[in-house]
Amino acid sequence: MTPLPTAADVAALDAADPLRHFRERFTLPEGVIYLDGNSLGALPRQTPDRVAGVLHGEWGDGLIRSWNSAGWISAPQRVGAKIARLVGAAPHEVIVADSTSVNLHKLIVAALSAQRGRHVVLSEPGNFPTDLYMAETAIGSLGAGHRLALAPRDELVAHITRDTALVMLTHVHYKTADMYDMAAITAAAHAQGALVLWDLSHSVGAVPLQLSACQADLAVGCGYKFLNGGPGAPAFLYVAARHQAALQSPLGGWMGHARPFEFVDGYEPAPGIARFLCGTPPILAVAALESGVDLHLEADMGQIAAKSRALATLFIELVEAHCHAYDVTLVGPPPGAPRGSHVSFRHPAGYAIMQALIDRGVIGDFRAPDIMRFGLTPLYLRFADVARAVEILADVLRTEAWRAPAYQVRRAVT
């Protein structure tokens, strides 16, 4: 049996961490161990000044001129091109727009409309709810015999048939951190003539992505998790260049028009990725997102992935050593297996335990019915933070502090 890391071992990991200097680039409250960056990223220190510059200089002084002089009108393409570097795509294949849910709707309808004679959207049970909800409602709007089919991930490939129009999957599972082999699934779908839509919300900025190399068709992702774009940050979507001329957004807003400032009555989709724009971009929010993306682009993705794996291994080893006796069980990949950048554990009283942890300055989150989820954000999380978080978790379990009545009351956001 491998001996558990000592305090000296943990300190050595932090001292050798090539990303350690990024921590000072974020605003982190004193006394807080933040393990929820997979749900809402921390605030980059540079973001308030960036947004203030847009507020006071570009909006306050430039007024409406800033659509031209400050490049507001091209911001969705500009920031999309930066995100393209993080997902392994060409600059003209990614654009910032709307929310993840809205972008799912656009791409689901566009794919089904293009795949005539095919009727099935295939996903897995337990996929992130908004993905399934948007598929249901998009299919309902189309009619014509379309349906949503669900298959367990170990049986998924066998369910891809000649009637499958679209395979829609989340690359990293939001609860378990299980990660699909993107290249293999995409190839299996293509062998049957189906398109694939990947949700990258728990992947982008956390794990290496190569959409072009995997021959991916479509993808969406959010900007407020590992990209640190702020609460409700705009999302992005990806359409491979080979599909852009054939796919049309079902939301024909004026920003997606080929000639938006000629103000003609009829809709004419813009060429390329711009056709998937809809309404006017929220410039303040896009500025905050761009700040987070710019910071992320300063880091090496290989180092981020390596540190993520090391943090997960340390977390799992320590929890299994110190908390196993208290009915805490790992959910998702074991150490060493491919995973996203969060770790989840199951406990019957998971919600109450998480509330007790938050009260003690360890912020994770809870996913029903019984999962405690801990995000591992390599740019600002230290190995010492992980070790200390497990100490606090073990104390909460040992003392049964989670039984306090206040921790049993469910809040609106868990």
Image (cartoon, helix red, strand yellow):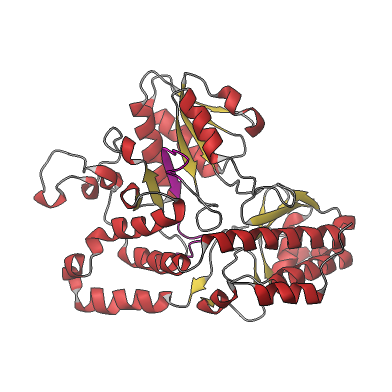
216 magenta-colored: yes
Name the residue at the bottom extreme. 30
317 and 347: which is toward the camera:
317
Residue under the image location 72 percent in, 62 percent down? 354
- Residue 76: image x %, image y %? 31, 57
The quarter of the picture where residue 295 lies is bottom left
- Residue 262: image x %, image y %? 9, 49
In which quadrant will I find the N terminus? bottom right
> Taking 174 as reference, is 77 left or right?
left
251 magenta-colored: no
> Taking 150 as reference, is 75 left or right?
left
Answer whether residue 259 is visible to the viewer in this image: yes
- Residue 27: image x %, image y %? 53, 77
In which quadrant will I find the C terminus? bottom right
> Taking 50 as reference, is 253 left or right?
left
169 and 214: which is toward the camera:
214
Please identify the dominant SS of the magenta region: loop
Q: Tag count in the figure?
A: 0
Residue under the image location 41 percent in, 56 percent down? 85
Answer whether residue 32 is visible to the viewer in this image: no
Say above or below: 402 vs 278.
below
Residue under the image location 36 percent in, 74 percent down? 51
The quarter of the picture where residue 297 lies is bottom left
Span highlighted in magenta in the image = 211-229
Say above or below: 107 vs 188.
below
